[in-house]
Amino acid sequence: MNQNNMAETKENKLVNRIAASGLKTIKLETFIPQAELTEIDLKEFLFKGLLLREKEFRQSMKEFDWSGTKGKVLCVHCSTDAIIAKWAYMLITMHAYPFASEIYFGTKEEYRAAALVSALKAVDWSAYQDQRVILKGCSEGYQIPEDAYIAATQGLLPHARSIMYGEPCSTVPVYKKPREAK
């Protein structure tokens, strides 16, 4: 028997002390927007992957099948160290706008991180008023970025009685609201 999680009562019943503790566990990955993503790497439209030639670039944007971005978040980035003129992003936006639900500058991972932080900043954290809260440390299938923990902690600070990081069986204390003087 794991002594951290279970304890025997006088009646020899097993009691899950973690469940009975009143701790509220928040899984930050549940706040990740579930939009379908697609991306365009601009190196595919550059001469030798490095040089933007205006005439050829404009032509390739006209010929590109934008229907594959329909209803999706389009993430636009360049995986090479090419210098891309700002008007090129405007041109991409003009072509993708009728199809994509949103157009974002960056990779899919960068989009997910930014969308997660944005979603966390929009949460009404007052539901955790005077609660003991754990921000879960391990996620399933997605690495939670550091700025998501910052956003969640900022939201919780005015409300939570305590904030911890980790798993219920092994937490790292981060914040504990000071007791008010009597």
Image: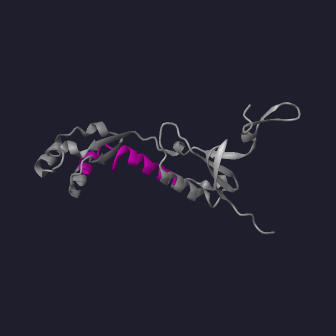
Q: Quadrant of the C terminus?
A: bottom right
In this view of the protein, which residue sits in the foreground, 32 or 143?
143
In this view of the protein, which residue sits in the foreground, 23 or 164?
164
Q: Is residue 71 among what the camera can see?
A: no
User: What x and y, as percent, mark residue 78?
Assistant: 26, 48
Q: Residue at x 24, y 50 (%)?
A: 94
Above or below, comparing residue 156 to residue 170 in the picture: below
Q: Is residue 178 among what the camera can see?
A: yes
Residue 143 part of the magenta-drawn span: no
Q: Answer left or right for 84 relative to 22.
A: left
Q: Quadrant of the N terminus?
A: top right
Q: Residue at x 17, y 46 (%)?
A: 46
User: What x and y, as percent, mark residue 49?
Assistant: 18, 45
Q: Residue at x 69, y 46 (%)?
A: 23
Q: Answer left or right for 31 relative to 95.
A: right
Q: Residue at x 16, y 51 (%)?
A: 52
Give the mark count: 0
SS assignment for the magenta stretch, majority:
helix
Residue 101 part of the magenta-drawn span: yes
User: What x and y, as percent, mark residue 178?
Assistant: 71, 63
User: Extreme bottom residue here?
Assistant: 181
Instruction: Tell me which segment is drawn in magenta.
Output: 92-120
User: What x and y, as percent, mark residue 7?
Assistant: 79, 36
